[in-house]
Amino acid sequence: MNTIDNDRTRWLALYVLCAGMLMIVLDATIVNVALPSIQDDLGFSQNNLAWVINAYMIPFGGLLLLAGRMGDLLGQRRVFLVGLTIFTAASLLCAASQNQEMLVGARFIQGFGGALASAVILGMIVTMFPEPAAQAKAIGVYGFVASAGGSIGLLLGGVLTDAISWHWIFFINLPIGIAVAILAKRVVANPEGIGLSEGADFPGAVLLTSSLMLGVFTILQIENWGWGDSRTLILSAISAVLLALFIFRQARIANPLMPLRLFRSRNVAGSNVLQALLVAGMFGMFFLGALYLQRVLGYSPLEVGLAFLPTTIVMGGLSLGLSEKLIMRFGPRTTLIPGVCLVVVALLLFARTPVDGNYFTDLLPPFLLIGIGVGTSFPAIMTLAMSGATPEDAGLASGLVNTSMQVGGSIGLAVLATLSTERTNSLLADGEGQLEALNAGYHVAYLIGAGLAAIAVAIAVFVLRSPRPEEMPVHQDAEAPQAQPDPALSEVG
């Protein structure tokens, strides 16, 4: 009976953690359909508007590795709850924003809290579920949240923006954040960390975050400065030097933020690079696809959200059901390859959408294909990325998985948005119509995204290897607590 109770508790803990993850992931895309409303209300220029998204994604991506390491040192549940508290409080600031500076600043704080909370979730999950079959199912649930959360955000953002106002896309986080924190204290295990004496590389985190922030800022300014401008070249060089210093530091210090030994594994290195490339194309599709529906086809925010709904449903059905069976039957690598191929096909189909596009013939097919591709590939990517991780490295490996996702998304979105805008402006200068120029710019981004996804296919085929059975779970002692409530909190409430 005790075993049954513990099993129920760990599955409840999984759902609580995934609810927190969903809230955090939503904020990467929930603002997309609200951007025109935010722009009109707060007076953002078209160029500065991207900072509403990137102010969240840059600290998120830059701090994930440090956050994962802090989870290993201080205890993963503790770091999760601190991050959740910061994220929820920052959501209130976002909702109350009355000017551009307040919103962008609050989004930055949100990204910081989101990094702390989300970096340790996957590590906690793979530790709670050491059995291969249960772990595959649990990662499928997590994979659905991490991948489909973007399209769910588009739907929820459209509903709230149309029904009330854009402020409510942030207000909605308050009750969810409070409920997740209360439940997490009751049902999520609270093992001690290995201690701060093992060291946390704060200078390394500063180098990495500074490199990412400067790099994305430079990419976003290319539209104004040009590719060959001295400011573009100098800032790009500084960003590259900061990244090189970060890598050099990791190779020399005793307790690195990102131990380079992790990348000796073909699966860890390959799956993280693959995920970054895939997410870059996906973020471009979600961001620019939402703009295409609004600016070219004239959809309302709610209609944009509903348009993406089939993607969400398919992702959910596959991530929560079929992907687990496919991974257990064929292995994660074999499951991954067809899924990524479908993403390539979907992005190529997006690149042929006309200015008078019909939803059922021009949009629904690629929406379904990308749902199938992502729904089957993301759980497999995460299984490969976490294969062989020890409990001591679970938080770090989890942080690395999330880092590759967020860095790929932020840098990819910045590059694709910049190239798309350049193409549009060039065609407008040549006398092309507004809708045709916008659509042609989006097509450039889709094609580049398809190219990135095609490189991801090559990595899956030539770099990744099927893990040995003993590498699939995270090993732990049979008597170690998996997801039991904290005894000190068992009588709370």
Image (tube, rainbow, N blue to C red):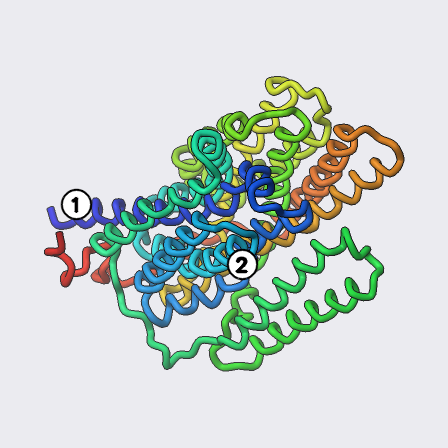
Front residue of 431/340: it is 431
The correct choice, above or below, for 183 with respect to 343 in the image is below
Q: Secondary structure at mark 1?
A: helix
Q: Quadrant of residue 471?
A: bottom left
Percent from the top left, x then y, of residue 467? 48, 53
Looking at the image, residue 103 sits to the left or right of residue 366; the answer is left
Q: Earlier in the sequence, mark 2 or mark 1?
A: 1
**Residue 238 place in picture, x, y as percent:** 71, 71
Tell me the residue at 62%/63% (across/down): 212
Q: Amino acid at mark 2?
A: Gly
User: Residue 403: percent from the left, percent from the top?
Assistant: 52, 58
Q: Is residue 61 above or below residue 34?
A: below
Query: Mark 2 to mark 1: distance in Å?
Result: 38 Å
Which of labels 2 and 1 is toward the front? 2
> Is residue 176 depicted above or below 297 in this figure?
below
Please tell me which residue lies in front, 232 or 115.
Answer: 232
At x 37%, y 53%, the residue is 88
- Where residue 231 appears, as percent x and y from the top left, is 78, 65
As shown in the figure, which amino acid type bears the numbered disc 1? Ile
Q: Are marks 2 and 1 in contact (CB under 8 Å)?
A: no
Q: Is residue 156 left or right of residue 231?
A: left
Q: Which residue is mark 2?
A: 61
Q: Is residue 417 visible?
A: yes
- Residue named by callout 1: 4
Quadrant in the picture for residue 473: bottom left
Question: How dense is the environment of label 1, judged by Cα within 10 Å: few (below 14), some, or many (20 and up)?
Answer: few
User: Residue at 70% across / 68% down in the picture?
Assistant: 240
Q: In front: 430, or 188?
A: 430
Q: Above or below — where is 357 with respect to 351? A: above
